[in-house]
């Protein structure tokens, strides 16, 4: 046995995880993490970002979907910091080696937890509502 994954969703799963921990050889490692976002959350926020990119402007112009995603993730990161609930990941802006431009080292939505993905969807609804975005999907997730 090289690896085991336990979803702590019921008492038996918790007992099995505890048993595995108690019986592993010395030197093995255990990592307990929040669950990663769900595929349905990812589909939802990507659809919303597409709606925003088609309908809204940012700093006076339209952006392609990938650029708008980066913009919105950055705005989301700032909103979460301002709310006192920063994301687990942190984006950075660094100068290029020659000092002529800035490089954005960003947050990856693929690493969002379920809770962060849900907060991002809520953020997108608010951001879009402020700009009269009409959503192509129903408000679920």
Image (tube, rainbow, N blue to C red):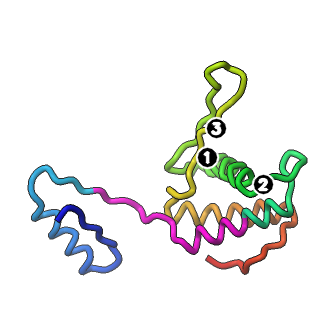
The residue that mark 2 highlights is 64
Q: Which residue is nearer to you in this view: 85 or 15?
A: 15
Calculate the distance from the C-alpha at mark 1 to the C-alpha at mark 3.
17 Å
**Label 3: which secondary element:** strand
Which residue range is magenta in the image? 31-48
Mark 1 to mark 2 CA distance (whole Å): 26 Å
x, y percentage for residue 106? 59, 44
Q: Residues within 10 Å of mark 1 (few under 14, many from 20)?
A: few
Helix, strand or loop at mark 1: helix
Residue under the point 54% across and 43% down: 90
Q: Does label 1 or label 3 sit earlier along the sequence?
A: 1
Q: Position of residue 136 (x, y in %)?
A: 78, 76
Identify the residue shown where x is 62% and y is 51%.
Answer: 80
In magenta stretch: residue 44: yes
Total marks shown come to: 3
Q: Is residue 26 left or right of residue 78?
A: left
Q: How far separated are the C-alphas under marks 2 and 3?
A: 17 Å
Give the residue number, with chain letter if any, for mark 1: 81
Within-10-Å neighbours for mark 2: few <14, some 14–19, many 20+? few
Circle on res. 56: none
In the rendered structure, the answer to whether residue 61 lies left or right of residue 23 reads: right
Residue 127 belongs to the span the image colors magenta: no
């Amino acid at each position: 046995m090289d690896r085991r994954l336990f979803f702590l969703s019921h008492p038996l799963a918790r007992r099995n995880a505890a048993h595995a921990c108690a019986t592993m050889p010395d030197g093995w490692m255990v990592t307990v993490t929040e669950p990663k976002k769900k595929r349905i959350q990812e589909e939802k926020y990507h659809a919303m970002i597409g709606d925003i990119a088609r309908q809204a402007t940012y700093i006076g112009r339209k952006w392609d979907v990938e650029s708008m995603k980066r913009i919105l993730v950055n705005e989301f990161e700032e909103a979460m910091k301002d709310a006192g609930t920063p994301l687990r990941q942190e984006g950075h802006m660094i100068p290029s080696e020659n000092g002529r431009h800035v490089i954005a080292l960003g947050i990856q939505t693929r690493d969002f937890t379920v809770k962060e993905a849900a907060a991002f969807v809520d953020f997108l609804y608010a951001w879009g509502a402020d700009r009269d975005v009409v959503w192509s999907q129903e408000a679920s997730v």
